[in-house]
Image: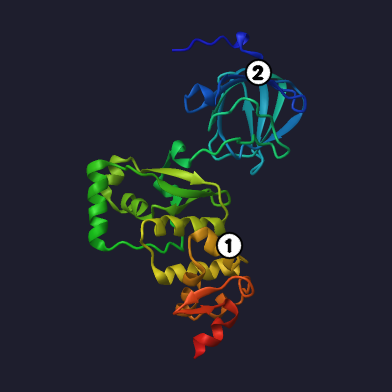
Amino acid sequence: MKIINTSELESDRVVSCPKDGFVSNRILLESDNMGYSMTKTVIPPKGKQFWHYKNHLESCYCISGHGILTSEKTGEEFIIKPDVTYVLDKNDPHYFEAIEEVVLMCVFNPPLVGNEVHNEDGSYETTDFHSPVYNVKSVPIEQIQANDYNPNSVAPPEMELLETSIWEDGYTQPVVTCYDYETDMYIVVDGFHRFLTLKNSDRIKERENGMLPIVVLKKGIGDRMASTIRHNRARGSHNIELMSTIVSELVEMGKGDRWICQHIGMSPDELLRLKQITGLASLFQNKEFSESWEAEMDGEEVSVENFESQKEV
């Protein structure tokens, strides 16, 4: 048990930011091993300020004062006064204006290390990598959306076994997702069949109250596809036709052969064979490896540059 008097905090736990004018008393930090941090933040009336905690989730309870919170996306305004809590559960970019001095109790996840101040983009930097599995959240199934590129497939008997397993043991692994700010949806990166089980099984959906455990990756669409393939290949299961579709889309995005091989765990030889199997001319447009990176195939060295001519023989 710990008893903490905020007025007696060590100086390194009291962070002042001249730019924003606020003073943040870091009551609990990552080093306290609570899984979250808690701060008492005092915000003076210095006009409208932009903050966007894209690396953290934050909830704030107003102890005293009067301020205006404005959503950067919608322009909607909210009056912040004593006993009002605002929750930035979607890393919401926002403006805050203290009409009079505002005192907030704030909780951050992942926890603050202790010395963070706002970056130019309104965020707090994360100094250490935290695996997403330490930040599992529960989201309504209606807010989850399958991706359209998953190269993994499961036969009906295995799907029935998965349903039985989840019914008997509960969800033991979260579904991996990425959040889409435009649609306010979580897109499945890995765990499509766990998602599908909750969606289609009435008994599991009822027991789980329609909520699915997820973790969230912060990745663009190209990196998101690569993450999906890495998850599938690590389990030794992927569909070659859908795999080739993803590779084709990555090429169209401008991803080079070197990037594709590095990020989805393919060797140059595998990539060349995939291109041969699909017969898609667009896959041969990138010549990044043609001069310096060759792969052996059937005892011969075959480069991307001369692969088309050999494929036609």
| Residue 173 position (above or below residue 250) | above
Report whether 90 appears left or right of 233: right
| Residue 160 position (above or below residue 20) | below
Amino acid type for the residue under numbered disc 2: Asp
Q: Give the numbered dot on residue 69.
A: none
* SS at badge 1: helix
Q: Nearer the viewer, residue 98 or 15?
A: 15
Q: Are marks 1 and 2 in contact (CB under 8 Å)?
A: no
| Residue 292 position (above or below residue 281) | above
Q: Earlier in the sequence, mark 1 or mark 2?
A: 2
Quick one: which residue is furthest to the front in this view?
A: 299
| Residue 243 position (above or below residue 89) | below
Mark 2 Cα-neighbour bin, 10 Å: few <14, some 14–19, many ≥20:
few
Residue at (25% x, 42% y) in the render: 169
Q: Which residue in the structure is indicated by mark 1? A: 259
Residue at (52% x, 86% y) in the render: 310
**Residue 298, image x and y in percent?**
44, 80
**Residue 118, image x and y in percent?**
69, 32
**Residue 168, image x and y in percent?**
22, 43
Q: Is residue 203 visible?
A: no
Residue at (53% x, 33% y) in the render: 110
Amino acid type for the residue under numbered disc 1: Trp
Q: What kind of colouring is applied to the model shown?
A: rainbow
> What's the distance in space between the residues labelled 1 and 2, CA to CA?
42 Å
Q: Which residue in the structure is indicated by mark 2? A: 12
